[in-house]
Amino acid sequence: MTQHVFDSTMSDRLAVVTGATAGIGYAVVKELVGHGCSVIANGRRPDRLKDLVLEFSNESVQTVRGDTSDEKIVEAMFDAARDRFGDGRSEADLVVVNAGRGLKGSVVDSDTAQWEEMIRTNLLGAALVIRHAARRMLANLERLGSRGKTWRDHPHDIVVIGSTVGRNVSPFSSMYGSTKFGVHGLVEGARRELGPKGVRVTLIEPGFVVSEFQGVAGYNPEWFKGVVDRIGPVLEPADVVRALMAAITQPPWVHFNDIALRPTRQDYP
Ligand SMILES: NC(=O)c1ccc[n+]([C@@H]2O[C@H](COP(=O)([O-])OP(=O)(O)OC[C@H]3O[C@@H](n4cnc5c(N)ncnc54)[C@H](OP(=O)(O)O)[C@@H]3O)[C@@H](O)[C@H]2O)c1
Protein backbone atom coordinates (compact mmCIF):
# COMPACT_ATOMS: atom_id res chain seq x y z
CA MET A 1 0.00 0.00 0.00
CA THR A 2 1.41 3.46 -0.84
CA GLN A 3 1.66 5.84 2.06
CA HIS A 4 0.63 9.39 1.16
CA VAL A 5 3.09 11.93 2.50
CA PHE A 6 1.90 15.29 3.78
CA ASP A 7 4.02 18.31 4.60
CA SER A 8 2.11 20.30 7.24
CA THR A 9 3.94 23.59 6.62
CA MET A 10 1.49 26.49 6.58
CA SER A 11 3.47 29.05 4.58
CA ASP A 12 1.82 28.14 1.29
CA ARG A 13 -1.67 28.67 2.65
CA LEU A 14 -3.88 31.57 1.68
CA ALA A 15 -6.42 32.53 4.32
CA VAL A 16 -9.52 34.68 4.63
CA VAL A 17 -10.58 35.52 8.20
CA THR A 18 -13.84 37.34 8.92
CA GLY A 19 -14.28 39.39 12.09
CA ALA A 20 -10.52 39.86 12.42
CA THR A 21 -10.52 43.21 14.22
CA ALA A 22 -10.96 41.76 17.71
CA GLY A 23 -11.13 38.64 19.86
CA ILE A 24 -10.90 35.24 18.24
CA GLY A 25 -10.53 36.53 14.68
CA TYR A 26 -7.60 38.77 15.58
CA ALA A 27 -5.90 35.91 17.43
CA VAL A 28 -6.38 33.66 14.39
CA VAL A 29 -4.75 36.23 12.11
CA LYS A 30 -1.81 36.60 14.47
CA GLU A 31 -1.24 32.86 14.61
CA LEU A 32 -1.58 32.36 10.86
CA VAL A 33 0.83 35.18 10.06
CA GLY A 34 3.26 33.64 12.56
CA HIS A 35 3.16 30.47 10.48
CA GLY A 36 3.86 32.38 7.28
CA CYS A 37 0.34 32.35 5.83
CA SER A 38 -0.98 35.17 3.70
CA VAL A 39 -4.18 36.54 5.16
CA ILE A 40 -7.11 38.64 4.04
CA ALA A 41 -8.56 40.10 7.24
CA ASN A 42 -12.09 41.47 7.41
CA GLY A 43 -14.02 43.60 9.87
CA ARG A 44 -16.01 46.83 9.82
CA ARG A 45 -13.87 49.19 11.90
CA PRO A 46 -11.32 50.98 9.68
CA ASP A 47 -9.01 52.03 12.52
CA ARG A 48 -8.66 48.42 13.68
CA LEU A 49 -7.97 47.23 10.15
CA LYS A 50 -5.28 49.87 9.76
CA ASP A 51 -3.70 48.66 13.02
CA LEU A 52 -3.63 45.10 11.69
CA VAL A 53 -1.68 46.11 8.61
CA LEU A 54 0.72 48.18 10.72
CA GLU A 55 1.25 45.27 13.09
CA PHE A 56 1.79 42.56 10.48
CA SER A 57 2.82 44.45 7.28
CA ASN A 58 0.87 44.33 4.08
CA GLU A 59 3.15 41.62 2.75
CA SER A 60 1.27 39.17 4.97
CA VAL A 61 -2.06 40.87 5.68
CA GLN A 62 -4.45 42.76 3.44
CA THR A 63 -7.78 43.99 4.67
CA VAL A 64 -11.27 44.16 3.24
CA ARG A 65 -13.59 46.34 5.24
CA GLY A 66 -17.31 45.69 5.46
CA ASP A 67 -20.22 43.66 6.60
CA THR A 68 -20.06 39.92 5.88
CA SER A 69 -23.79 39.84 5.24
CA ASP A 70 -23.16 41.97 2.14
CA GLU A 71 -22.40 39.66 -0.77
CA LYS A 72 -20.29 42.31 -2.54
CA ILE A 73 -17.99 42.44 0.48
CA VAL A 74 -17.73 38.67 0.57
CA GLU A 75 -16.83 38.58 -3.14
CA ALA A 76 -14.28 41.35 -2.54
CA MET A 77 -12.55 39.31 0.19
CA PHE A 78 -12.09 36.31 -2.07
CA ASP A 79 -11.07 38.44 -5.04
CA ALA A 80 -8.47 40.17 -2.87
CA ALA A 81 -7.08 36.82 -1.73
CA ARG A 82 -6.73 35.60 -5.31
CA ASP A 83 -5.44 38.83 -6.81
CA ARG A 84 -3.13 39.98 -4.03
CA PHE A 85 -1.68 36.69 -2.84
CA GLY A 86 -2.77 33.98 -5.28
CA ASP A 87 -1.08 35.27 -8.46
CA GLY A 88 -4.51 36.09 -9.84
CA ARG A 89 -5.27 32.37 -10.11
CA SER A 90 -5.17 30.48 -6.81
CA GLU A 91 -8.09 31.02 -4.48
CA ALA A 92 -8.13 31.01 -0.67
CA ASP A 93 -7.64 27.52 0.77
CA LEU A 94 -8.38 28.39 4.40
CA VAL A 95 -11.45 30.39 5.36
CA VAL A 96 -12.34 31.17 8.95
CA VAL A 97 -16.01 32.11 9.31
CA ASN A 98 -15.81 33.95 12.58
CA ALA A 99 -17.61 37.34 12.38
CA GLY A 100 -20.49 37.27 14.79
CA ARG A 101 -22.10 38.84 17.80
CA GLY A 102 -24.04 37.88 20.87
CA LEU A 103 -27.17 39.33 22.40
CA LYS A 104 -28.13 39.44 26.03
CA GLY A 105 -31.42 37.87 26.88
CA SER A 106 -33.97 35.38 25.68
CA VAL A 107 -36.73 35.32 23.11
CA VAL A 108 -38.89 36.94 25.78
CA ASP A 109 -36.67 39.75 27.00
CA SER A 110 -33.88 40.44 24.45
CA ASP A 111 -33.90 43.67 22.44
CA THR A 112 -35.93 43.06 19.28
CA ALA A 113 -34.23 46.04 17.60
CA GLN A 114 -31.02 43.95 17.49
CA TRP A 115 -32.51 40.68 16.24
CA GLU A 116 -32.22 41.45 12.57
CA GLU A 117 -28.58 42.57 12.66
CA MET A 118 -27.61 39.52 14.69
CA ILE A 119 -29.39 37.10 12.39
CA ARG A 120 -27.93 38.79 9.33
CA THR A 121 -24.39 38.63 10.69
CA ASN A 122 -24.41 35.28 12.45
CA LEU A 123 -26.50 33.24 10.04
CA LEU A 124 -26.85 34.91 6.64
CA GLY A 125 -23.30 36.28 6.68
CA ALA A 126 -21.90 32.88 7.65
CA ALA A 127 -23.94 31.23 4.89
CA LEU A 128 -22.65 33.68 2.27
CA VAL A 129 -19.04 33.20 3.30
CA ILE A 130 -19.40 29.40 3.31
CA ARG A 131 -21.04 29.52 -0.12
CA HIS A 132 -18.35 31.63 -1.76
CA ALA A 133 -15.52 29.81 0.02
CA ALA A 134 -16.87 26.51 -1.26
CA ARG A 135 -17.16 27.69 -4.85
CA ARG A 136 -13.66 29.12 -4.87
CA MET A 137 -12.16 26.03 -3.24
CA LEU A 138 -13.82 23.71 -5.71
CA ALA A 139 -12.29 25.81 -8.50
CA ASN A 140 -8.88 25.46 -6.80
CA LEU A 141 -9.30 21.71 -6.63
CA GLU A 142 -10.16 21.55 -10.31
CA ARG A 143 -7.02 23.49 -11.10
CA LEU A 144 -4.98 21.11 -8.94
CA GLY A 145 -6.49 18.27 -10.95
CA SER A 146 -5.39 19.84 -14.21
CA ARG A 147 -1.82 19.77 -12.82
CA GLY A 148 -2.05 16.07 -12.02
CA LYS A 149 -2.60 16.64 -8.29
CA THR A 150 -5.54 15.87 -6.03
CA TRP A 151 -7.25 17.10 -2.86
CA ARG A 152 -4.81 14.90 -0.93
CA ASP A 153 -1.89 17.10 -1.99
CA HIS A 154 -3.19 20.31 -0.46
CA PRO A 155 -5.68 20.93 2.36
CA HIS A 156 -8.78 23.08 1.86
CA ASP A 157 -10.51 24.21 5.05
CA ILE A 158 -13.63 26.14 5.91
CA VAL A 159 -13.61 26.59 9.69
CA VAL A 160 -16.74 28.02 11.30
CA ILE A 161 -16.96 29.36 14.84
CA GLY A 162 -20.17 28.04 16.36
CA SER A 163 -20.88 27.92 20.08
CA THR A 164 -21.82 25.65 22.94
CA VAL A 165 -25.18 27.47 22.83
CA GLY A 166 -25.58 26.18 19.27
CA ARG A 167 -25.86 22.67 20.71
CA ASN A 168 -27.24 23.11 24.22
CA VAL A 169 -30.44 25.09 24.44
CA SER A 170 -30.02 27.97 26.83
CA PRO A 171 -33.29 29.64 27.85
CA PHE A 172 -31.28 32.72 28.84
CA SER A 173 -29.70 33.38 25.41
CA SER A 174 -32.20 31.74 23.15
CA MET A 175 -32.11 34.34 20.35
CA TYR A 176 -28.30 34.24 20.04
CA GLY A 177 -28.33 30.49 20.55
CA SER A 178 -30.85 30.01 17.76
CA THR A 179 -28.48 31.70 15.28
CA LYS A 180 -25.73 29.29 16.32
CA PHE A 181 -28.07 26.29 16.04
CA GLY A 182 -28.69 27.48 12.48
CA VAL A 183 -24.96 27.82 11.83
CA HIS A 184 -24.29 24.32 13.15
CA GLY A 185 -26.89 22.96 10.73
CA LEU A 186 -25.30 24.82 7.84
CA VAL A 187 -21.87 23.49 8.72
CA GLU A 188 -22.98 19.88 8.91
CA GLY A 189 -24.83 20.22 5.61
CA ALA A 190 -21.77 21.77 3.98
CA ARG A 191 -19.52 19.09 5.46
CA ARG A 192 -21.63 16.36 3.92
CA GLU A 193 -21.70 18.18 0.58
CA LEU A 194 -18.06 19.25 0.36
CA GLY A 195 -16.16 16.60 2.35
CA PRO A 196 -16.53 14.03 -0.44
CA LYS A 197 -14.98 16.57 -2.81
CA GLY A 198 -11.95 17.16 -0.59
CA VAL A 199 -12.95 20.29 1.35
CA ARG A 200 -13.00 20.01 5.15
CA VAL A 201 -15.79 21.99 6.81
CA THR A 202 -15.02 22.23 10.50
CA LEU A 203 -17.14 23.45 13.37
CA ILE A 204 -15.53 24.87 16.49
CA GLU A 205 -17.85 25.27 19.44
CA PRO A 206 -16.37 27.39 22.21
CA GLY A 207 -17.88 27.98 25.61
CA PHE A 208 -17.21 31.29 27.39
CA VAL A 209 -14.33 33.22 25.78
CA VAL A 210 -13.31 36.59 27.14
CA SER A 211 -13.30 39.16 24.31
CA GLU A 212 -15.29 42.17 23.13
CA PHE A 213 -18.20 39.77 22.71
CA GLN A 214 -19.57 40.40 26.22
CA GLY A 215 -19.71 44.18 25.71
CA VAL A 216 -21.28 43.94 22.25
CA ALA A 217 -23.87 41.46 23.54
CA GLY A 218 -24.75 43.85 26.34
CA TYR A 219 -23.93 41.54 29.23
CA ASN A 220 -23.98 43.16 32.63
CA PRO A 221 -20.28 43.29 33.68
CA GLU A 222 -21.21 42.25 37.23
CA TRP A 223 -23.04 39.21 35.89
CA PHE A 224 -20.07 38.24 33.72
CA LYS A 225 -17.70 38.72 36.65
CA GLY A 226 -19.92 36.31 38.58
CA VAL A 227 -19.56 33.77 35.76
CA VAL A 228 -15.78 34.11 35.80
CA ASP A 229 -15.71 33.78 39.60
CA ARG A 230 -17.82 30.62 39.41
CA ILE A 231 -16.31 28.76 36.46
CA GLY A 232 -13.13 30.64 35.56
CA PRO A 233 -10.64 31.03 34.27
CA VAL A 234 -12.70 31.26 31.10
CA LEU A 235 -11.19 30.69 27.67
CA GLU A 236 -8.95 33.21 25.93
CA PRO A 237 -9.07 33.66 22.13
CA ALA A 238 -5.67 31.91 21.95
CA ASP A 239 -7.28 28.76 23.40
CA VAL A 240 -9.72 28.68 20.51
CA VAL A 241 -6.86 29.23 18.08
CA ARG A 242 -5.05 26.12 19.36
CA ALA A 243 -8.13 24.04 18.61
CA LEU A 244 -8.35 25.54 15.13
CA MET A 245 -4.68 24.87 14.44
CA ALA A 246 -5.07 21.26 15.53
CA ALA A 247 -7.75 20.82 12.88
CA ILE A 248 -6.13 22.60 9.95
CA THR A 249 -2.67 21.09 10.35
CA GLN A 250 -3.95 17.55 9.93
CA PRO A 251 -3.18 15.85 6.64
CA PRO A 252 -5.96 16.53 4.09
CA TRP A 253 -7.42 13.06 4.54
CA VAL A 254 -7.95 13.51 8.30
CA HIS A 255 -10.79 15.69 9.50
CA PHE A 256 -11.37 16.87 13.07
CA ASN A 257 -14.80 18.02 11.94
CA ASP A 258 -16.33 19.16 15.22
CA ILE A 259 -14.43 20.48 18.21
CA ALA A 260 -16.12 21.66 21.41
CA LEU A 261 -14.00 23.39 24.02
CA ARG A 262 -15.00 24.92 27.31
CA PRO A 263 -13.43 26.35 30.41
CA THR A 264 -12.85 23.22 32.46
CA ARG A 265 -15.35 24.24 35.13
CA GLN A 266 -18.10 25.28 32.68
CA ASP A 267 -20.77 22.63 33.15
CA TYR A 268 -23.39 24.28 30.97
CA PRO A 269 -24.18 25.35 28.29
N1 LIG B 1 -16.79 35.16 23.22
C1 LIG B 1 -17.48 34.07 23.43
O1 LIG B 1 -17.81 33.73 24.60
C2 LIG B 1 -17.88 33.19 22.28
C3 LIG B 1 -18.29 31.88 22.56
C4 LIG B 1 -18.67 31.06 21.53
C5 LIG B 1 -18.65 31.52 20.23
N2 LIG B 1 -18.25 32.80 19.97
C6 LIG B 1 -18.26 33.24 18.58
O2 LIG B 1 -16.96 33.57 18.18
C7 LIG B 1 -16.99 34.54 17.14
C8 LIG B 1 -16.04 35.67 17.46
O3 LIG B 1 -16.44 36.28 18.67
P1 LIG B 1 -15.42 37.02 19.66
O4 LIG B 1 -15.61 36.42 20.99
O5 LIG B 1 -14.07 37.06 19.07
O6 LIG B 1 -16.12 38.46 19.67
P2 LIG B 1 -15.53 39.94 19.44
O7 LIG B 1 -14.29 40.14 20.24
O8 LIG B 1 -16.68 40.86 19.66
O9 LIG B 1 -15.15 39.95 17.89
C9 LIG B 1 -16.13 39.89 16.90
C10 LIG B 1 -15.52 40.25 15.56
O10 LIG B 1 -16.52 40.16 14.53
C11 LIG B 1 -16.54 41.38 13.79
N3 LIG B 1 -17.88 41.56 13.27
C12 LIG B 1 -19.05 41.61 13.94
N4 LIG B 1 -20.09 41.76 13.08
C13 LIG B 1 -19.55 41.79 11.84
C14 LIG B 1 -20.08 41.91 10.54
N5 LIG B 1 -21.40 42.03 10.34
N6 LIG B 1 -19.24 41.91 9.47
C15 LIG B 1 -17.91 41.79 9.66
N7 LIG B 1 -17.35 41.66 10.88
C16 LIG B 1 -18.15 41.67 11.94
C17 LIG B 1 -16.08 42.45 14.77
O11 LIG B 1 -15.44 43.52 14.15
P3 LIG B 1 -16.07 44.92 13.66
O12 LIG B 1 -16.90 45.43 14.79
O13 LIG B 1 -14.86 45.73 13.34
O14 LIG B 1 -16.86 44.58 12.44
C18 LIG B 1 -15.00 41.67 15.52
O15 LIG B 1 -13.80 41.67 14.78
C19 LIG B 1 -18.46 34.96 16.99
O16 LIG B 1 -19.03 34.26 15.92
C20 LIG B 1 -19.07 34.50 18.31
O17 LIG B 1 -20.45 34.22 18.17
C21 LIG B 1 -17.86 33.65 20.97
Image (cartoon, helix red, strand yellow):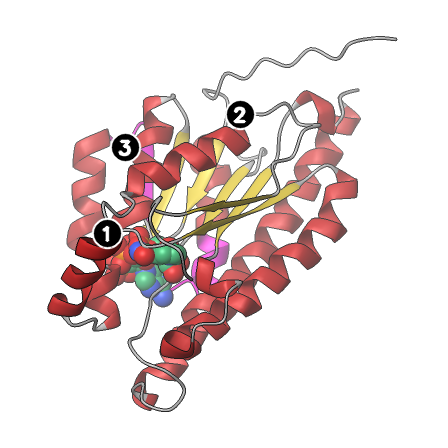
Q: Quadrant of residue 268?
A: bottom left
Q: Mark 2 points at which residue?
A: 249
Which quarter of the frame holds ligand 1? bottom left
| Left-right relation of 62 to 93 | left
Q: Amino acid under label 1?
A: Val
Q: Name the residue under label 3.
A: 58
| Residues drawn in magenta | 57-76
* Vertical order, 249 against 99 (above or below): above
| Left-right relation of 242 to 248 | left
* Vertical order, 3 against 251 (above or below): above
Q: Amino acid under label 2?
A: Thr
Q: Does the residue labelled 2 lie within 8 Å of ligand 1?
A: no
Labels 3 and 1 touching (C-beta < 8 A): no
Q: Say few, some or many: other residues with alpha carbon within 10 Å of mark 1 (under 14 / 14 to 19 / 20 or more).
A: some
Q: Residue at x 50, y 21 (%)?
A: 12
| Left-right relation of 253 to 60 | right
